[in-house]
Image (spheres, rainbow, N blue to C red):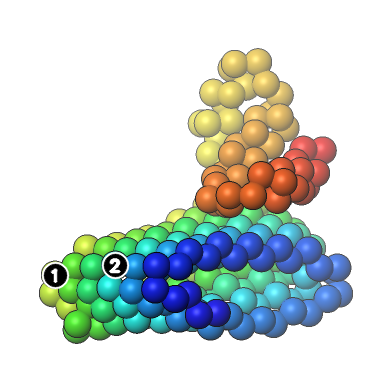
Amino acid sequence: MFVGENAQLEYNKIQDKKDNNYSISTEQVFQASNSNFTINTATFNGALVRNNLTIEVDGNNCETNLNGLYLGQNKDHIDNHTIVDHKKPYCNSNEVYKGILDDDSVGVFNGKVFVRQDAQITNAFQQNNNILLSDDAIANSKPELEIYADDVKCSHGSTIGQIDDEAIFYLQSRGLSRKSAINLMINAFAKDALAKISIEALSSYIDNKIENRFGN
């Protein structure tokens, strides 16, 4: 994908494979000055799913957004590997990936942000959060920053954990059953990851998929 000067592009990628399906895909994105690129990736199933995403920010005043949600179950293995390469100054990138992993599923996030020497006044944010719903689920998270400029604001973070028992207890004290409280928290966590989807029908479709997965 070539996002030209002053252009805006929103790319929405929905992966809903069968339990025995394999999918390996690569997206290469080039951004020119004053461009805005957003990718939203939702992965619901698949024996092996790997997404390779490389974005070259080769212009001034660019905005780059990477948002992802992956829901693993059974023996799913879901990989997200991202690279954002800042080459020019005055640019912003925001990266938020969230995973919910159940049964024996495995989720992998490996994200790297480069800030080259000429890319001064760069703001780069990277976050990966995971919830494990079973003792056998696995999350591997590796956010990385490689910075060669000195006038930048960059941060990254990662969390892996289970449902907060205190939050569940609070919701139960407000009249919800334990199951309803857990489903409410999972839905809120999942939907937040893809809040930047601008197509209402697609957003509703994803909401329904999440409801069907965790609402029963």
Q: What's the CA distance linking mark 1 and mark 2?
A: 15 Å
Residue 52 % position (x, y): 57, 80
Q: Is residue 35 left or right of residue 39?
A: left
Secondary structure of the residue carrying tag 1 is loop
Regarding residue 174, the answer to whether it shows in the image is yes
**Residue placed at 61% from the left, 83% from the top?**
26
Relative to 75, 95 lies left or right: left
Q: Amino acid at mark 2?
A: Asn
Per the rendering, the mark at residue 170 is: none
Tell me, yes or no, whether the two marked residues, 1 and 2, touch with CB atoms within 8 Å.
no
User: Measuring 14% from the left and 70% from the top, which residue is drawn there?
Assistant: 151
Which image quarter holds the N terminus? bottom right
Q: Earlier in the sequence, mark 1 or mark 2?
A: 2
Q: Position of residue 216 (x, y in %)?
A: 82, 38
User: Nearest the camera: 89 or 51?
Assistant: 89
Q: Identify the disc placed on residue 151.
A: 1
Residue that extends furthest to the left in the rendered view of this protein: 150
Amino acid at dot 1: Asp
Residue 61 — which label?
A: 2
**Residue nearest the observer in this picture, 150 or 163:** 150
Instruction: Classify residue 90 by image quadrant.
Output: bottom left
Q: Is residue 160 visible?
A: no
